[in-house]
Amino acid sequence: MNERPDIVIALIEMMGGGTDGWGRSMGRKVFDRLRDHVDKRPEQRIFGISLAGIEHLDLSFASESLVEIAKRYRGTKGFYLTDMPDDDVRDNIDAAAARKDQPLFVWCNRVPTLIGAPPSPGNREALAFALDRPATRASDFASTRESMSIANSSSKFKQLWNGGFLLRSDGSADSGGAEFVYHPISDAPIAAYAR
């Protein structure tokens, strides 16, 4: 697979060059532009959204644009944020994402910060495990945990995928059957599963 998610969308371009995002109406217009951009690239699974040059975003704008695009494609495409201008913008996006129960990752120097909806306490360890690898299977996680079944591990990863924390692709189990491969929503390559 080894696809690069090198499609990084400049939010400022989707905003027509403006540096301030205010209100639901403007957010919906930007969402439409983001959706059009994404729909023209059906094979692309991960999109970065750069906030370079952005000065202000209110909660309503963030909700209707950034959070809504991630929520719309949850499970099939992933969106991460980069070039976060300041804590005020991050806090508004965080609050908007939490309201819509949508997680979002902010990546800076290959280090993720999760904002918005948190994973359940029982799935945090599985998410941390997945974020440390370009690809992982439920059996990998189960093999590192004492007395964890593959079924239990698989359930955790499925919940993380359904919740919008991870992407997944079809893979093969060591037994020859099918087993999903899970990938972080990041700016790193999505690797084919390799032992």
Image: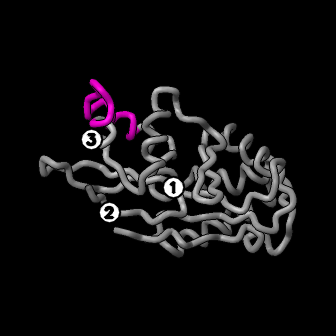
- Asked whether residue 36 is drawn in magenta, I would say no
The residue lying at 38 percent from left, 40 percent from top is 158
In magenta, the rendered stretch is 143-158
Whether the residues at callouts 3 and 2 have beta carbons within 8 Å, the answer is no
- Asked whether residue 151 is drawn in magenta, I would say yes
Question: 65 and 108: which one is in front?
Answer: 108
Q: Which mark is residue 185?
A: 1
Disc 3 to disc 2, how far (Cα)?
A: 16 Å
The residue lying at 53 percent from left, 75 percent from top is 40
Choose the circle earlier in sequence order: 1 or 2: 1
Q: Which residue bears the numbered disc 2?
A: 192
Secondary structure at badge 1 equals: loop
> How many other residues sit within 10 Å of disc 1, few (<14), some (14-19) or many (≥20)?
many
Choose the circle earlier in sequence order: 3 or 2: 3
| Kind of residue at badge 2 | Ala
x, y percent for residue 106: 64, 53
x, y percent for residue 74: 51, 51
Q: Which residue bears the numbered disc 3?
A: 139
The reply, left or right, for residue 35 in relation to residue 168 is right
- State the quadrant of the C terminus: bottom left
x, y percent for residue 50: 69, 65
